[in-house]
Image (spheres, rainbow, N blue to C red):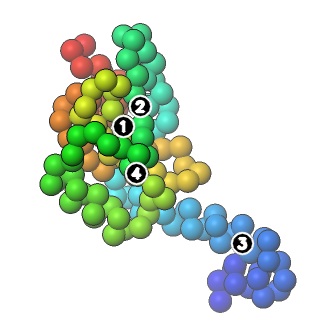
Amino acid sequence: MDISERLEKLGLKKLAKGFSKKKEIIDKMKIAYKTYPIVSAEKFDSYNKKLNKKRQTLKSYRIEDYDDSIPSEEVLKKLDEAEVLKCFDYFEITRVEEQKDPILFGRINGCPDKFFIAQWGDDVKVEDILLGELPND
């Protein structure tokens, strides 16, 4: 019997539910951090500030709201693989506003980091964000 089951059995239902939820997030994060390159919230924000100086911005969309360029077969395959792992609560597509080539990230509720899954095109690359280099710098 794990700790959340034991807490539940002993009547500590709210505590058990909270513990179970935290454990679920931790389990997802273990898989994601082990499997995917990470873009920290700080790196993402820093890159966006540099873009803002050029009057550009990174725009992120939940995958279900994205309706622009069709991902390549390779990107779709990587998305399928990420879905199988079941470590992400949702997927996000990020691109420089007014440009069409995006990056696909996995996201976990409660975790500020973005997990790089794939990109298509080369308007912005995950390497640019990680290194803080704007295209044509």
**Residue topped by disc 4:** 64
Q: Residue furthest left?
A: 73
Regarding mark 2 in the picture, which secondary structure is present there?
strand
At 16% from the left edge and 53% from the top edge, which residue is drawn? 74
**Residue topped by disc 2:** 59
Residue 34 position, x and y percent, is: 38, 58
**Residue topped by disc 1:** 94
Residue 118 position, x and y percent, is: 26, 47
Left or right of residue 105: residue 30: right
Q: Which is nearer the N-term, disc 3 or disc 1?
A: 3
**Residue topped by disc 3:** 17
Quadrant where the image shows the N terminus: bottom right
Distance from the alpha carbon under mark 1 to that under mark 2: 5 Å
Marks 1/2 in contact by CB < 8 Å: the verdict is yes
The three-letter amino acid code for the residue at tag 3 is Lys
Q: Where 93 sits versus 33, above or below? A: above
Can residue 131 be seen by looking at this rendering?
A: no
Residue 3 position, x and y percent, is: 69, 80
Distance from the alpha carbon under mark 4 to that under mark 1: 13 Å
Regarding mark 3 in the picture, which secondary structure is present there?
helix
Quadrant where the image shows the C terminus: top left
Q: Which is nearer the N-term, disc 4 or disc 1?
A: 4
